[in-house]
Image: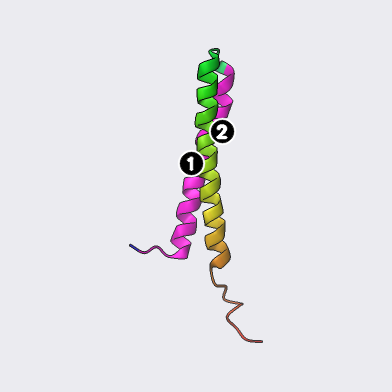
Amino acid sequence: MSLSLRATMIAAAIFAAICLGVAITGFMSLGSLTDPKAIEDAKGFAWFWAFLGSIALGLGLLAWRITPRSDESEDP
């Protein structure tokens, strides 16, 4: 299976948005927890999703960076 760079960028953006949304939700829900163990578990969960989102964002930016531009192919 081969994905084009444009499809890779779109998929990375969608996946990053979902992951970062889950991370933000996890961080915002910390205020309602009282058990210290549950708070630590929730922080770990939220940081994991933030990490996944940042990796997806980085790969999407890398795909965008290596995409050939139409103005670069023209010789001056």
* Residue type highlighted by circle 2: Ile
What residue is rendered at 49% in x and 40% in y? Answer: 19
User: In the rendered structure, which segment of residues is drawn in magenta?
Assistant: 2-31
- Label 2 sits on a secondary structure element that is helix
Kindly tell me whether residue 36 is visible in this rendering: yes
Callout 1 crowding tier (Cα within 10 Å): few <14, some 14–19, many ≥20: some
- Label 1 sits on a secondary structure element that is helix
What residue is rendered at 52% in x and 56% in y? Answer: 60
In the picture, the disc for residue 18 is 1
Location of the C terminus by quadrant is bottom right
Q: Residue 3: which quarter of the image?
A: bottom left
> Residue 37, image x and y in percent?
52, 17
- Residue 24 belongs to magenta span: yes
What residue is rendered at 61% in x and 77% in y? Answer: 71
Q: Are marks 2 and 1 in contact (CB under 8 Å)?
A: no
Location of the N terminus by quadrant is bottom left
> Residue 63, image x and y in percent?
52, 61
> Residue 40, image x and y in percent?
54, 22
The residue furthest left is 1
Q: Earlier in the sequence, mark 2 or mark 1?
A: 1
Kindly tell me whether residue 33 is visible in this rendering: no
In the picture, the disc for residue 58 is none
The number of numbered discs placed on residues in the rendered structure image is 2
Q: CA distance from mark 2 to mark 1?
A: 10 Å
- Residue 73 belongs to magenta span: no
Whether 20 is drawn above or below 6: the answer is above
Viewer-proximal residue among 18 and 47:
47
In the picture, the disc for residue 24 is 2
Callout 2 crowding tier (Cα within 10 Å): few <14, some 14–19, many ≥20: some
What residue is rendered at 50% in x and 34% in y? Answer: 22
* Residue type highlighted by circle 1: Ile
SS assignment for the magenta stretch, majority: helix
